[in-house]
Amino acid sequence: MPDGRFQSGKRYTVHRYTPTISIAPIYLTMIVGNIIYLNVLGTPIVVINSASTARDLMDKRSSIYSDRPRPDNEMVVPSICSAALSSNLSPELEEQLSFAAFSALAAGLDTVCHVDKSSTFHTSHDSPEIQAEARAEIDSCVGNHRLPTLDDKDSLPFVRSVITEVMRLYPPGPLGVPHSLQQDDVYNDMFLPKKSIIIPNVWYMLRDPEVFNKPEIFNPSRYEGLDSEMQKVTDPTFGFGRRVCPGRYFAENTIFAIVATLLATCEILPPSDSTGKECKSEVPVAGTGAIAFYGPFECIIKPRPETSHLLGKL
Ligand code: HEM
């Protein structure tokens, strides 16, 4: 698919790291504007291609768009943590349960790591001017005598823009996390039945040429340092309505702390061969599940002479 928007009767790979999605024409029921409605073997699926439509439905009508898809006969059960605390478990089972509970946290770790790794990749492999501009901002605001802290976040809009631009091009969840519609609904004369699975096509929303000029280009300056512009990326990236990611601010702060500290203390360069010639690699995104992963890549991380004394404080 050339631009990431779902269309009828085609087999799609939204990007090489997203799951391949086949849309057979026989299943296609309707396309209205930025919405595609499918009925796949009796299961209604609604794919939303635009951020404004996603806001209209998943944010403004959040009370009916915030369920998660689940089998009809599923019963509500206590969480694994409360079950573990209230029962007399063997040490082995308790250990297994604690691993299962940790997997929820790991979902947060994977997404945060993805953004940290992609920030490192882009600052080393894209234009060196972008890295220099971000570092100059840190130097002028923070100086060379201390490490950046979260209190500096507001004063470092270009560093935040670099992170935002990385998330725009390679969102950790390119197709978001599906919601389920709790009751029949009508949107722009389109009937959407109860129990439809709602899939936000975040990948396309963040490359929509009507929202982002030259969307394929890595250009942190496009936000002009404005939070209102950056939110056009961060809002869809962290989900919609009542299901919006509860770890959002923790994640944003963690990513900022890591990226700002790395830029303040180190220079990040692409790898070079034995003759000193740069040998840049392809963007190493991978993963066939809901979460995108950054594969291994090479780069050179050199302590900056001006701030190397701060590395001991990490
Ligand atoms: C860059 C980092 C992250 C991204 C992009 C991200 C994105 C998302 C998205 C898209 C959803 C689904 C929202 C929806 O259904 O509309 C979600 C859900 C969730 N996230 Fe995150 N997340 C990140 C980090 C974290 C962290 C660090 C934590 C925990 C510390 C976390 C915990 C959760 C939980 C518990 C849910 C499920 C919420 C629910 O089902 O009601 N996430 N996240």
Image (tube, rainbow, N blue to C red):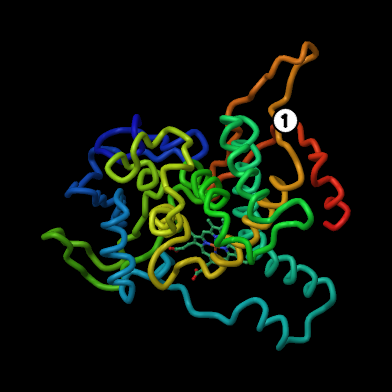
> Picture coordinates of residue 259 (x, y %)?
66, 50
Q: Is residue 173 left or right of residue 207?
A: right
Q: Quadrant of the N terminus?
A: top left
Q: Nearer the viewer, residue 39 or 281?
A: 281
Query: Residue shown at 28%/57% (left/top)?
Result: 52
The answer to whether residue 290 is visible is: no
- Specify whether tag 1 is near ligand 1 (CB below 8 Å): no
Q: Is residue 124 left or right of residue 99?
A: left
Quadrant position of residue 232: bottom left
Q: Nearer the viewer, residue 43 or 311?
A: 311
Query: Residue shown at 68%/56% (left/top)?
Result: 142
- The kind of residue on which mark 1 rests is Glu
- Total tally of numbered discs in the picture: 1
How many neighbours does mark 1 have within 10 angstroms: few (below 14), some (14-19), or many (20 or more)?
some
| For residue 242, above or below residue 156 | below
Query: Residue shown at 72%/48% (left/top)?
Result: 264
Most extreme residue toward the bottom is 86
Query: Residue shown at 50%/51% (left/top)?
Result: 173
Residue assigned mark 1: 298
| For residue 193, above or below residue 221 | below
